[in-house]
């Protein structure tokens, strides 16, 4: 259930981010191919954790740009969600070994 919720969050994030970029004259791109798979649940959690780390870095870099305050608040909300996901996967990774 939690992972399904995270997937929905990520879709919402991409929609918000695309809208923000388009509003600011930047053409968004999507780089989600090829699909990521793993041989074990532990390996998949590690990949998920790496992905969340990358998203956190991306949103931090976006916040360094010159966006208006309402836009920054949206990006900060997205960043907070990614940090929450990262925390979840970190905890899960420690529980799995």
Image (cartoon, grey):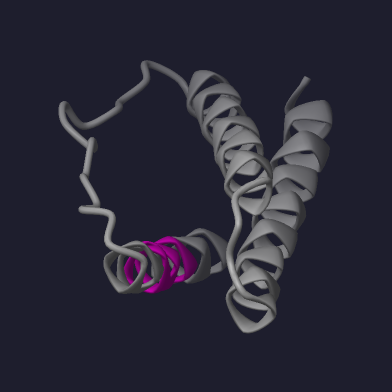
Q: Residue at x 32, y 74 (%)?
A: 23
- Seen in the image, is 41 located left or right of residue 32? right
Q: Residue at x 48, y 69 (%)?
A: 9
Q: Name the spot of residue 82 as percent of width and height, x first.
A: 65, 53
Image quarter in which the C terminus is found: top right
Q: Name the spot of residue 6 as percent of width and height, x first.
A: 51, 62
Q: Name the spot of residue 5 as percent of width and height, x first.
A: 50, 71
- Seen in the image, is 39 located left or right of residue 77? left
- Start and end of the magenta stretch? 9-17
Q: Residue at x 37, y 20 (%)?
A: 38
- Residue 84 is a magenta residue: no
Q: Name the spot of residue 90 as percent of width and height, x first.
A: 78, 35
Q: Where is 63 relative to 96, above or below? A: below
Residue extending farthest to the left is 34
Q: Identify the main secondary structure in magenta.
A: helix
Q: Where is 61 relative to 6, above or below? A: above
Name the foreground residue: 79 vs 33. 79
Name the foreground residue: 9 vs 25. 25
Number of marks in the rendered image: 0
Name the foreground residue: 86 vs 15. 15
Name the foreground residue: 85 vs 17. 17
Q: Where is 71 relative to 45, above or below? A: below
Task: Kindly indicate the quadrant of the structure image that contains residue 66.
Answer: bottom right
Q: Residue at x 56, y 31 (%)?
A: 54
Task: Kindly indicate the quadrant of the structure image that contains residue 72.
Answer: bottom right
């Amino acid at each position: 259930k939690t992972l399904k919720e995270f997937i929905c969050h990520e879709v919402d994030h991409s929609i918000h981010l695309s809208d923000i970029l388009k509003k600011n004259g930047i053409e968004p791109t999507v780089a989600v191919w090829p699909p990521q798979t793993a041989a074990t649940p532990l390996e998949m959690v590690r990949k998920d954790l790496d992905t969340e780390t990358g998203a956190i870095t991306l949103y931090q870099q976006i916040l360094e740009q010159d966006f208006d305050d309402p836009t920054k608040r949206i990006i900060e909300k997205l960043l907070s969600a990614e940090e929450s996901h990262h925390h979840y996967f970190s905890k899960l990774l420690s529980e799995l070994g």
